[in-house]
Image (cartoon, rainbow, N blue to C red):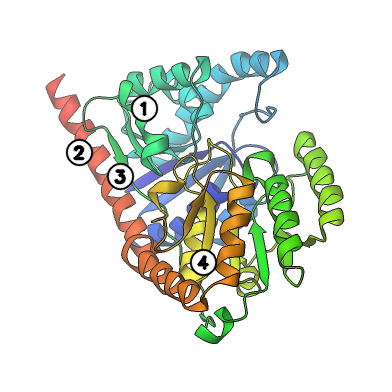
Amino acid sequence: MRLLVLDQFSDPGGAQQCLLEFLPAVKERGWSALVGLPGEGEMFERVRQAGFETARIRCGPYHSGRKSWGDAARFAGGTPLLARQIRRLAEKVGAELVYVVGPRLLPAVALAGLRLPVLFHSQSYLFPGAVRRMAGMALRKCRAQVVGACRFVAEPWKAFVPPGGVDVIYNGVAGPRNNSLTRDKLKHVATMGCIGRIAPEKGQREFVEAAAIIRRALPECRFVIYGAALFSDRSARRYEQEVQAAGAKAGVEFGGWVTDVYSALDAIDLLLVPSAGHEATTRVILEAYAAGVPVIAFRSGGIPEVVDDGRDGWLAGSAEEMARLAIELLRGDPEKLAAAALAAGGSWRQRFTIARYHEQLFAAMERAVRQSWIAERGS
């Protein structure tokens, strides 16, 4: 199958990492793809290294979060230009399916007037309002199929597609090459970490708050934040500076951005995930499962869909509750943490392997093509 892949970001994030890991499977299956990306991010080079052609598409730049009037003007003026570009790219590769990662691309895909099946992969939650309605109307016009990374992000799109047009496919991760976790390591829990892009929705400020509480009860513990803000996002850079200032007072260390997440996970004994309420399932939880690292996460967004509270991890409603759980676990029977680590590894093998993820995504793509063919024959 020939794919036209469109991503609204070229800086690496969780969704982009999923795409980079999916492309080699596309090649192994004998399919081909042209990947359209905006901006100047490192995704261009990484996609080319995977053996796929890239094209720079006209999308943005836009501010993250709440959009300005300038963003709205750029979107209105740029969408028709992007639609023509998408049409040319689809014709160039003889695309049989358009695979869209990012809702801001959907209006241009709809305006392009392609008589092709469209699969939209929703990796994050889109708040109610005009942007969601615009994306939803574009889905309806395209007769698109939708894949959601969890039920939380998938549910809103059901209003815009026919019954059965939305699937939930949880992301998968490859896991570490060597899992060095041992039961002995868990008997001396000392280091807690937070891993991810530094941004308010990832909750580093709440991590610092929890760390300060835990340190008062267990002063021997260490706390590390791994990650960095996207340099193109000024608000995230300001947030990073605030977190670093607060972290310095709480004795939190900063490990910077890590390209190998498993090297960071190997250095910590308990992962804290204080994500905001609109987060999806957050990939780092699945990576922690694969590495056998216990998790305490906020009970927010799609996280309860992947954390079985009290078995393979724990859920908290606030930084204070997260700290209380961590203190109880670290003061309690180490076998409880060891059992959670084993259960986490089992959850990864049963639900979140990369092979399972790829097969389900391929099946969704093939189903989108079949449904499009059936709809064309019936119209």
**Badge 3 or badge 4: first in the primary sequence:** 4
> Can you give x and y, in whole percent of width and height, for residue 41 in the image?
68, 46
| Residue under label 3 | 365
Residue 74 located left or right of residue 176: right
The secondary structure type at the circle numbered 4 is loop
Whole-angstrom CA distance, mark 1 to mark 2, is: 20 Å
> Can you give x and y, in whole percent of width and height, for residue 198 in the image?
71, 48
Establish if 46 lies above or below 304. below
> Can you give x and y, in whole percent of width and height, for residue 349 in the image?
35, 69
Q: Amino acid at mark 2?
A: Arg
In this rendering, the count of numbered labels is: 4
Within 10 Å of disc 1 (Cα), the crowding (few <14, some 14-19, many 20+) is many
Establish if 86 lies above or below 296. above
| Residue under label 4 | 294
Q: Are marks 4 and 2 in contact (CB under 8 Å)?
A: no
| Residue under label 2 | 370
Which label was assigned to residue 157? Answer: 1
Q: Which quadrant of the view contains residue 194?
A: bottom right
Q: Amino acid at mark 3?
A: Met
> Can you give x and y, in whole percent of width and height, for residue 191 in the image?
68, 70
Image point 26% across, 38% down: which residue? 368
The secondary structure type at the circle numbered 3 is helix
Residue closer to the observer: 47 or 138? 138
The secondary structure type at the circle numbered 1 is helix
Q: Give the residue furthest to the left.
A: 378
**Badge 1 or badge 2: first in the primary sequence:** 1
Q: Amino acid at mark 4?
A: Pro
